[in-house]
Amino acid sequence: MPGAVVVGAGPGIGRAVARRFAREGLPVALIARTGVTLEAVAALGVRTVSLTADATDETALRAALDKAAAELGPPEVVVYNAAIIRADRPGELSPRGTWTPGRSTSSAHSNASTSASLIG
């Protein structure tokens, strides 16, 4: 497949990247947690495969990737853009990037927030 797979094709960067590939005429496989976010790219007139999978569910993600490859062939490009963006508040982040459900996993972000809390 001379095209792309975009994991995390929801609103924002994922959808914008998918639309860019589609504008260039490339077939695009779109993977998102909900089908609603997939409709905007599918309307661009190129061959698209819209698949629903949560990137945190390895079994579901593998199944979606297998289906994309089965329908469009092996991709030339895979964009992994899955993320949940939430506002952070002081004291919500665990130090040194330790994962806590519903909180950031970024070590740099955690360390910066911890330092800021300690300083002032």
Image (cartoon, rainbow, N blue to C red):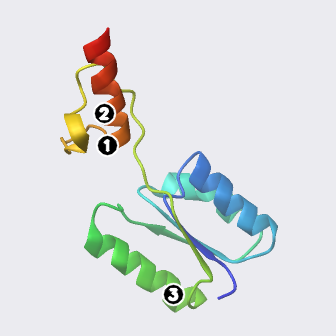
Residue 59 has which mark?
A: none
| Residue at 36 percent of width and 80 percent of height | 63
- What secondary structure is found at the residue carrying circle 2? helix
| Residue at 53 percent of width and 52 percent of height | 10
Asked where in the image residue 20 lies, by quadrant, the reply is: bottom right
Q: N-terminal of the two: label 3 or label 1?
A: 3
Q: Nearer the viewer, mark 3 or mark 1?
A: 1
Quick one: label 1, few (<14), some, or many (20+) residues within 10 Å?
some
Screen quadrant of the C terminus: top left
| Residue at 28 percent of width and 16 percent of height | 117
Which residue carries the number 2 mark? Answer: 111
Locate residue 3 relative to residue 99 in the image: left or right.
right
Screen quadrant of the N terminus: bottom right
**Cα distance in 3D space between marks 1 and 2:** 6 Å
Which residue carries the number 3 mark? Answer: 69
Q: N-terminal of the two: label 3 or label 2?
A: 3
- What secondary structure is found at the residue carrying circle 3? helix
Kindly indicate whether the residue at mark 2 contacts the one at mark 1 (C-beta within 8 angstroms). yes
Q: Position of residue 85 (x, y in %)?
A: 42, 39
Residue 107 has which mark?
A: 1
- What secondary structure is found at the residue carrying circle 1? helix
Q: Position of residue 55 (x, y in %)?
A: 36, 62
**Cα distance in 3D space between marks 3 and 1:** 34 Å
Q: Tell me which amino acid carries mark 1.
A: Ser
Instruction: Looking at this view, name the residue that lies furthest to the top.
Output: 120
